[in-house]
Image: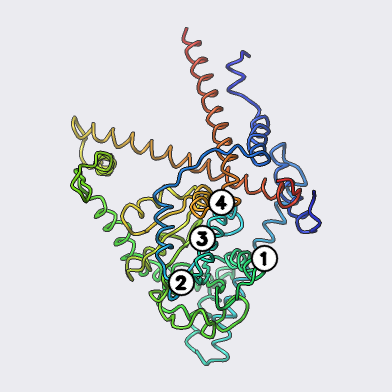
Amino acid sequence: MNLFNKLQRIDPRIIYALMFVALSFPLLSPLGIPLSVSSMTRAMYERIEALDPATDVVLLSFGYSPAAAADIHPQAVAVVDHLTKRGIRWVGVSFWAEGPMMIEQITSVLEARGGRYGTDFANLGFKAGAENAIAAFANNPLVITTDFVGNRTAELPIMQGITHIRDFGYVIEFASGDPGIPAWIRQVVDPMGVRMSAGAVTVSVPQFVPFVQSGQLDGLLAGLRGAAEYELLLQAPGRALAMMDAQSMGHLLIIAFILIGNAAYLVTKFTKKD
Amino acid sequence: MFSTNIWHWVMAAAILSIFSFLYRENAIYRLAEHIFVGAAAGHTLGMAIGNIHRFGWVPLTTKDQWTLIVPLVLGILLYARFIKGFAWVSRWPIAYLVGNGVGLSLYTSLQSQAVLQARASMIDFIVHDQAGNFLLNKSFDNFILVFGVLAVLTYFIFSIKQSAPLKTVSHAGRWLMMVTFGVSFGNVVAGRISLALGRLVDLYDVWLKIM
């Protein structure tokens, strides 16, 4: 078997090992590759910058599970960091069973830093029903009668004066599947005229960009890169930014293998013809 | 170096067990996989039972919201499909779910994902900024967007035989779709790398503390 045939039949374990090295090296020894900020990320950032800390309460919907957390949880952390820095209160809710766990990972850190649960932020937990639940919640957020830790939702200081989703200053959905961004747009954005931004897993970004183009979404964070861009705007480098070098190296490796494989295929094909 | 939290060690063991599949399938991988599937199913079941209790049973028994009997009974009837001779009963709650879903999303889907998207495609080819200067980039973007929508829609015209000019536009639509699928696939690859990176960061930063 000549070299070009061998190149088309590389043992996958060699590729996995090279990918492991390509991803690990930049994590342990950062390269400092520059990162640009997309207009979709900037739009979301500016939207939050325009909120009034005295009156606005932001609704964060956590529509993902630990399986997608590596791609999307850094977005939620960066956005909550922004809200906290600006003194904007926020309420977390989830229509995914695992969502409250992800909210709790954030609230536990804020509480350790002196944040006041129930006043500065709250975790309303999970409500089953998918799109039905989103529609019911939008019409009356108090349909969730108790929060994740057992407090009566109507008695939480942060929920005072909130009887409809329009009473929230802004809505942000972090989505990795269904129910997700399309459900929120169908039930909340278009029928009720509520403004919203979203964060999506990298895989789903192409299908949601049209919503940004049409104006149905103000902004969109695109996976881990979106989180890194947001950290850059906040001037608070975090996990996402640290992973970007490794992400770039991983992509370069895959491009290299695609080029090698295709070149080997073409050489083999033209050699056979001869 | 090395975390002293037992759960970080459990996490590291689980990650390395799953990664061991990349070398070859083995018993340790199967053990980790079964634990994950069982834990995820158990968590989902616990949350579901909690929801039924929180939003169904408690209001029914403590706040006299007797109308909640209807969804509770419909939910129980779903399990009738496992009883021989009574499986037909489960069609009623399924019919309710389907009807509810269609009613909830039919109009809104058409509005949000068809009408408003079509309206967003009706844009200017000649774009000026507020000072009146012609914006070449934006105008070109808009042209590509509109041409792309029309070309792709043309590809899906199957009711007439496509010839000369229509066929050319249809071919352009096919190429644009291939580019779009390439973009989607690239995003899939990027997403999988992000997930792998998350696990590596957990190993290096949380477990080994060498980042």
Q: CA distance from mark 2 to mark 4?
A: 29 Å
Chain bearing tag 4 is A
Callout 2, which amino acid?
A: Pro
- Tell if the residue under mark 1 belongs to the same chain as the one under mark 3: no
- Tell if the residue under mark 2 belongs to the same chain as the one under mark 4: yes
Assess disc 2: are there few (<14), some (14-19) or many (≥20) residues with their C-alpha within 10 Å of its C-alpha: some
Residue A168, position in %: x, y?
42, 73
Question: Residues at badges 2 and 4 in contact (C-beta under 8 Å)?
Answer: no
Q: CA distance from mark 1 to mark 3?
A: 31 Å
Question: Residues at badges 1 and 2 in contact (C-beta under 8 Å)?
Answer: no
Q: CA distance from mark 3 to mark 4?
A: 14 Å
Q: CA distance from mark 3 to mark 2?
A: 15 Å
Residue located at (76% from left, 48% from top): B208
Assess disc 3: are there few (<14), some (14-19) or many (≥20) residues with their C-alpha within 10 Å of its C-alpha: many
Callout 3, which amino acid?
A: Val
> What residue did someone put label 1 on?
B42
Q: Is residue A3 left or right of residue A265?
A: right
Callout 1, which amino acid?
A: Gly
Marking on residue B68? none
Marking on residue A79? 3
Callout 4, which amino acid?
A: Asp
- Tell if the residue under mark 4 belongs to the same chain as the one under mark 1: no
Single out the mark in the foreground, 4 or 1.
4
**Nearer-N-terminus badge (3/4):** 4
Chain bearing tag 2 is A
Tag 2 secondary structure:
loop
- Tell if the residue under mark 3 belongs to the same chain as the one under mark 2: yes
Residue located at (57% from left, 65% from top): A99
